[in-house]
């Protein structure tokens, strides 16, 4: 990343990021900070006010290129979650340039940015639908909120799945527990079990985990020692918990062999069943992270 920066609006700088991709850095009046690439509208860093630790994980060997997804932060999966359909893994939105509609500080002093992606010849070659996506990111005090709006701007209905694929940075994932999942039903993609009831009051991340939980309570707590992070979703139907465990990385991979120890993904998602959006309809979903 170069050091050349120039101010665009109060609380914001425009930065040449890795791979020469454009990136914005924003800070709130009370000291919260986040960074986001226009590529994928991807938030890659978040510091709550008064914190010296980044709460989001970004792989040290992430690929920064116009045709690649960035490993870490909060990739936006749309219009397909994972490999559940004919599109590239997790759809195309995370590997396309978005337009920055607005960025800076709002009247309360919060740092915020609004990004937009609409259909074009490239997207319609992959997925023949007219749409508009907007991602609004807000940081203030100890909170980061990501809100996604998806509008059907065409004449025909379409189905979609999605996820805010949030990588939470931890010191050692083997010491992490997630509270709030007990009683929820899930699909275990590692063991290939389709309908399992969670019996643990606290889910330990002590083995490879790839689960799609259905109808999860609004708020989960991610605990690591004395540190906690509340994760609240609205508008989505599922919560995905993912950590690949050891032995996944390979030569040329965008993840170091031991990187699994440094993150756990807790994702607000629509994954169990697609949403059908009629013409002129808009869907809304959000995820809010609140640090202790």
Image (cartoon, grey):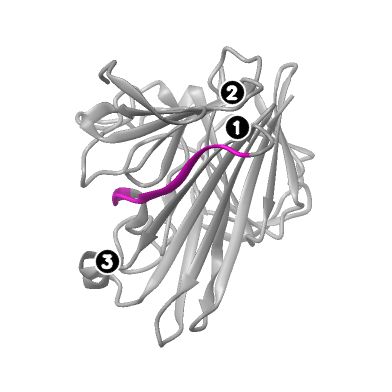
Q: Which mark is residue 123?
A: 3
Q: Position of residue 33 (x, y in %)?
A: 54, 25
Work out which quarter of the rendered image holds the C terminus and state it: top right
Q: Which region shows up in magenta?
A: 95-106
Give above or below for 47 relative to 153: above
Q: Nearer the viewer, residue 241 or 135?
A: 135
SS class, disc 3: helix
Q: Which mark is residue 174?
A: 2
Q: Nearer the viewer, residue 210 or 114?
A: 114
- Magenta-span inclusion, residue 163: no
Q: Position of residue 205 (x, y in %)?
A: 60, 32
Looking at marks 2 and 1 on the same chain, the residue that comes earlier in the sequence is marked by 2
Horizontal side of residue 223 vs 258, given as left or right: right
SS class, disc 2: helix
Looking at marks 1 and 3 on the same chain, the residue that comes earlier in the sequence is marked by 3
Q: Which mark is residue 205?
A: 1
């Amino acid at each position: 990343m170069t050091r050349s920066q120039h101010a665009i609006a109060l609380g914001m700088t425009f930065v040449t990021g890795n791979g020469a991709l454009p990136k914005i850095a924003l800070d709130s009046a009370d000291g919260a900070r986040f960074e986001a690439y226009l590529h994928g509208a991807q938030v890659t860093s978040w510091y709550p006010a008064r914190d010296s630790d980044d709460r989001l994980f970004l792989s040290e060997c992430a690929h920064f290129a116009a045709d690649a997804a960035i490993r870490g932060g909060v990739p936006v999966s749309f219009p397909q979650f994972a490999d559940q359909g004919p599109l590239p893994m997790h759809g195309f939105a995370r590997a396309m340039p978005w337009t920055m509609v607005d960025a800076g500080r709002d009247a309360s002093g919060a740092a915020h940015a609004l990004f937009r992606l609409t259909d074009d010849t490239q997207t319609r070659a992959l997925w023949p639908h007219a749409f508009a996506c907007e991602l609004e990111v807000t940081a203030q005090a100890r909170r980061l909120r990501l809100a996604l709006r998806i509008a059907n701007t065409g004449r025909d209905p379409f189905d979609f799945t999605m996820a805010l694929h949030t990588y939470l940075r931890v010191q050692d994932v083997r010491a992490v527990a997630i509270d709030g999942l007990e009683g929820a039903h899930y699909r275990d993609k590692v063991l290939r079990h389709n309908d399992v009831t969670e019996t643990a009051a606290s889910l330990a991340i002590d083995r490879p985990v790839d689960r799609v939980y259905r109808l999860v309570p609004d708020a989960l707590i991610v605990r690591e020692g004395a540190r906690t992070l509340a994760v609240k979703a609205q508008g989505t139907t599922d919560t995905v918990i993912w950590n690949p465990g050891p032995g996944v990385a390979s030569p040329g991979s965008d993840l170091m062999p031991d990187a699994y120890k440094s993150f756990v993904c807790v994702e607000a998602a629509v994954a169990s069943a697609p949403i059908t959006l009629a013409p002129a309809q808009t869907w809304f979903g959000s995820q809010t992270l609140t640090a202790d």
